[in-house]
Amino acid sequence: MLVDIGEGSSGRALRHVLRLTAPARTTLETLGRPTTKLLVGHRGLGGSENLRDHALGAALDGAIRRWQQQVRASGVDLPARVHAQALRHSAQAHHGRARNNTQATHERDYQLQDEDVRAASRGAVELGLAQALVSARQTVAMRLVAEADAEGEVSAELVAKEAGIDVEVARRIVAGRLRTPVASCADFLNSDHSQAGMPCAVSFLLCFACRNAVATGRDLPRIAYLHQALESLRSAVTSAVWVADWARHHARIGDFLTTYTTTDARPELVAAVADSERELIHAMLERRLDP
């Protein structure tokens, strides 16, 4: 049963169809040839005496051909071939809303295929992509002090200055006493993702979105290997699982590497990862290191 629940509903569409086709059925009844069929039409260019039930599906094409002939005769320049599918596409793109199909179909098969819509949307799309990029970069909160890749007071002072942290914390970072699988943590008790004053209780993947995370040059190989491992994982899970569990982490890590490394340098970074570090990364991805 079709119920009219407003514009766009099947019931409303049927109401319009019944109203539009009512005169044809009324004419047939007057001529002594009543019908209960929904669609009726006429044969050729004759009058009401030629009105009949629709037995063939060529009435619309015939009407379009006759219309083409008439408007071309009046001097209108039309494409070589105008057909029902093209007219439907133009009408739906022009009206800018779904018509007898889903909103997803309307956007994918009509709007995205229409040159005028694509041209008019270019500015909005470019702005949206730019804003998404800015947002992604803002969520990558982990800092890198690439030059500090060895122990020593000079490295500690550099980390303190570049990361904006206390020099004593920086000394512990360069000494390797605050290391996580991906970087070092400058304040384990005040994470961006856990209750203040309590030990951090989230996945190490969120270090990339935490202001307490500080990476040095010696962390870059593991980060590059982590990104490669995530790329491999992407083909092993469903799209839904990827979007729900991994896509944001992959985007953050990818943006971090894009910011601080080059594509050509990453194979060398990955090659420098020790077997024990690879096992650590896989343990993290398998959530065996989560609190």
Image (cartoon, rainbow, N blue to C red):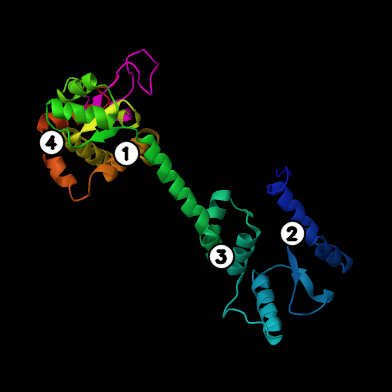
Please give the residue where the numbered disc 3 appears in the rendered image: 116
Q: Quadrant of residue 63?
A: bottom right
Q: Is residue 31 above or below residue 251?
A: below
> Residue type at mark 3?
Asp
Q: Quadrant of residue 250?
A: top left
Please give the residue where the numbered disc 1 appears in the rendered image: 250
> Where are the magenta residues, as a range?
180-206
Label 1 and label 4: CA atoms lie apart by: 19 Å
How many neighbours does mark 3 have within 10 angstroms: few (below 14), some (14-19), or many (20 or more)?
Answer: few
Residue 250 magenta: no
Label 3 and label 4: CA atoms lie apart by: 51 Å
**SS of the residue at dot 2?**
loop
Please give the residue where the numbered disc 4 appears in the rendered image: 273
Q: Residue at x 34, y 28 (%)?
A: 210
Residue 260 place in picture, x, y as percent: 25, 42
**SS of the residue at dot 3?**
helix
Please identify the dominant SS of the magenta region.
loop
The answer to whether the residue labelled 2 contacts the one labelled 4, judged by CB atoms less than 8 Å apart, is: no
Q: Residue at x 68, y 49 (%)?
A: 8
Residue 183 magenta: yes
How many neighbours does mark 1 have within 10 angstroms: few (below 14), some (14-19), or many (20 or more)?
Answer: many
The answer to whether the residue labelled 1 contacts the one labelled 2, judged by CB atoms less than 8 Å apart, is: no
Q: Residue at x 21, y 24 (%)?
A: 170
For residue 239, side relative to residue 24 (left or right):
left
Please give the residue where the numbered disc 2 appears in the rendered image: 38
Label 3 and label 2: CA atoms lie apart by: 36 Å
**SS of the residue at dot 1?**
helix
